[in-house]
Structure formats: C-alpha cells, structure tokens
Image (cartoon, rainbow, N blue to C red):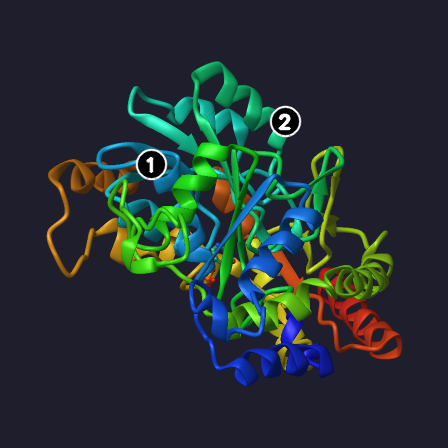
Amino acid sequence: MPGFELFGEEEKKQVQDVLDSGILMRYGFDGMRNNHWKAKELEKAIQNRMQSKHAQLVSSGTAALTVALASAGIGVGDEVIMPTFTFVASFESIMAIGAIPVLVNIDDTLTLCPISVEKAITKKTKAIMPVHMCGSMANLNALKSICTKHNLLLIEDACQAIGGSYDGKPLGSYGDLGCFSFDFVKTITSGEGGAVITNNEKYYKNADHYSDHGHDHFGNDRGAESHPFLGYNYRISELHAAVGLAQINRLDDFIAIQKRNYNILKNALQGVEGVIFRTVPEGGEENYSFLSFYLPNEKLAQKIHKAFSENGLDACFYWFNNNWHYYRKWQHLINATSLGNLSDETKSKLQEIKQKDFSQSDSWVSRNISCLIKLGWTENEMTKRANKAKKIIEHILAQ
Ligand SMILES: *Cc1c(COP(=O)(O)O)cnc(C)c1O
C-alpha cells in the first residue's frame, strides 16, 4: 500500500479511453461514449473479485459508508455502533444521515470488541459497523451472531483491508453491506472513489438510486427518469473509475508484494521478547497492508516509535496520539462542534462519550505500533528495514 506507487501503462490507457470519447460522466450519453462504461466495468470487476451479487461505485469511501447506511434505511435517531479506533469517516457518515454514532471499545484484534458491542446495544441500535483497521478484520463470526440475535445490520468498513478474507469470503462480503475506499493512499486507488457491495437486491437498488439524486435509471433518457425517493449526489466520474479499473486488475499482485514484505518484517520480529503481534481472528487472512504489534507498555511503545522515525523507519504509526484515527483526539465529535445545529438527541448521546470507560481500548492502542507495508520496497530494502527495526526494539527493550 498505497496503489499509487505502481501506476503504469494500464492506468494511462484506461484514462485515455475516457478522454478520447470525452464523456467523463458515468451515466447517459450512450451514443457518444465509444462504448466506454468504465464505472460499470469496474462495478462488474468488484462484484467478481468480491464474490458479491452487487456493487455500487461512489465518490469516496466516506460516501460508500453513508450510502450503505442510507440504503439500509438507517436515519434520524437510529444508533450505529462503531469502534474507538477507526478513521473519522465512521462517525461522519453516521451523522451525515442524522443517525447517532455509539463508540465502543476495541480488543487485541485492534477492531470492535464483541463483548463491549453487546453491552452497548439499546432499543435504538440499528447497525454494527466494524472497521477492519490496518489490513486485518474484526471477529465477524461473533459480530454476526450478535446481529442475528438482536436483529441488527452488519456493515463492514473494509476501506483499509481490501483483498483480505474471512471464513473464505472476501472482506466486505460477509456482512449485509461492505464498503471500500479508493482514495489516494489506499491499497488500490482511483484518486478518489469508493464502493458499496451487497447481496441484497433492495439495498443495491437503493444505493444505485440514492447515490444519483434518486434517479431510477430506467431507460436512456436521464431527464425522463423518475425519482422514487430522495437521494443525493455521490457519483464517481468515468476518469476516476478508469484508474480504478486498471488498479483492481492489479489488486492480487499488490497483495502478493505486500505479503512478501510483511513476512520479512514479521519473521524478523518473531521471537523478539516483549513483542506480540496483533490478534487475527481465526479464519481470517489479512491484506498485509500493515504489520501491527504490541510492546510491553505505553512508554516503551512511544520510545520505540520515536527511535524508528529517527532512524529512517518513517512509515510506522503510533495511533494512540493520532489526530484522525483514535477517539482521544476527536474533540470536535466529543464536544459536538458542528457548523450547524445538531439534534438534541444526538448532542446528548455524544455527551456520553466523555463518561465512557475506554481503558480497554487504551490498553491496546497505547502499546501498539503499526508499520505500513509499501509496495515499492524491494526484498533487499525490506530486509534491511526489518533488521533495523529488530535491532532498535531489542536495544530499547534491553535497557
Ligand atoms: C480511508 C478510509 C475511509 C474513507 O475513505 P475516503 O475515500 O477517504 O473517504 C473510511 N474508513 C476507513 C477505515 C478508511 O481508512
């Protein structure tokens, strides 16, 4: 990761097709587009790769989450359970449709803790939205059981784990709906873009209409189409889809490179006393975009992370102090700082965040370092990095 490291001729050719016809929009203009339907083709490719009946492309991963929630009928006042460790897009999408984000602890998987999830369920809970952070997945089996028991939807945020799998199914395809991002720093990119996948025809139709102003997409005269319900514009452009089409065909090659580099680092750190790797749920296969591990305590983790950066191991993250990925820095959410009014219900539920005990999340995230696995690193470079990381950790833990 990220896919932009390996742009090549395929991406250029796909984009050139679109520029040659001049039709940058994914819908309509049938006669002028030289039969180029890049968004449609990319949707087919996503369906095939993700073993999913339907795929709807949208303008971003955040849009994918928003459209997934809206398509499943979630709206004002509904509660959606999300993890303390994720990207801000989780609560942004929930709040965009008027629903209420309920933050819940993570566990040693660095994703939603099923026990904490069950405790957070109320009469208003409509969905559980696990986030497969840093290339590995939530315990989907446990979460699915909870959803079945309480009649809730399972919506997977697979934006950081595309290409991984669980129980033999591609991540994103296990829940009722799954979401991907193709933003510029993801495993595959289209510049900006995202996708929703589902096996549920109704949710798919809703996503198709909702993401394009409610257009029903019958016939080939856009102006004459009807609007069965209110929608919005979350469309992707043909130019973006063209880049994505080239990239999805390379996904498995990218994952193979990530896996090679990941294993070099993992093998080097394996057996270093004091280092334990993040737990990957049984039956899960990561997409190898990060290697995440825990140190004995917060102080040592910070010290090692600092030593990594000072020694050129720059692509490693210490999420505990991160502005965007951990609840501790989400003051704008916790204080409900919004440009416009929020509902009283939302404001009062957000106030509860301050009183919640997230020490379980803290105990994992404060000890964690996640090292990004780049595509551009050769085996040789990766081996050097891995040995350097090992030496630094051993040196600091021996002090
Ligand atoms: C990147 C990301 C998103 C949002 O994707 P955008 O395309 O940048 O809007 C959502 N969730 C997670 C976990 C992400 O990493």
Question: Residue placed at 53% from the left, 28% from the top?
Answer: 114
The picture places residue 39, in percent across and down from the top left corner, at: 54, 62
Residue drawn 33% across and 45% down?
A: 94
Mark 1 surroundings: few (<14), some (14-19) or many (≥20) residues within 10 A: few
- The quadrant of the image that shows the N terminus is bottom right
Residue where numbered disc 2 is placed? 141
Q: Is residue 304 above or below residue 174?
A: below
- Which amino acid, by three-letter code, is at mark 2? Asn
Q: Secondary structure at mark 2?
A: helix
Is label 1 or label 2 in front? 2
Disc number for residue 189: none
The C terminus: image quadrant: bottom right
The image shows residue 389 at horizontal and vertical percentages of: 76, 69
Residue at image location 56% in from the left, 25% down from the top = 144
- Name the residue tied to disc 1: 356
Secondary structure found at label 1: loop
Q: Quadrant of residue 75?
A: top left
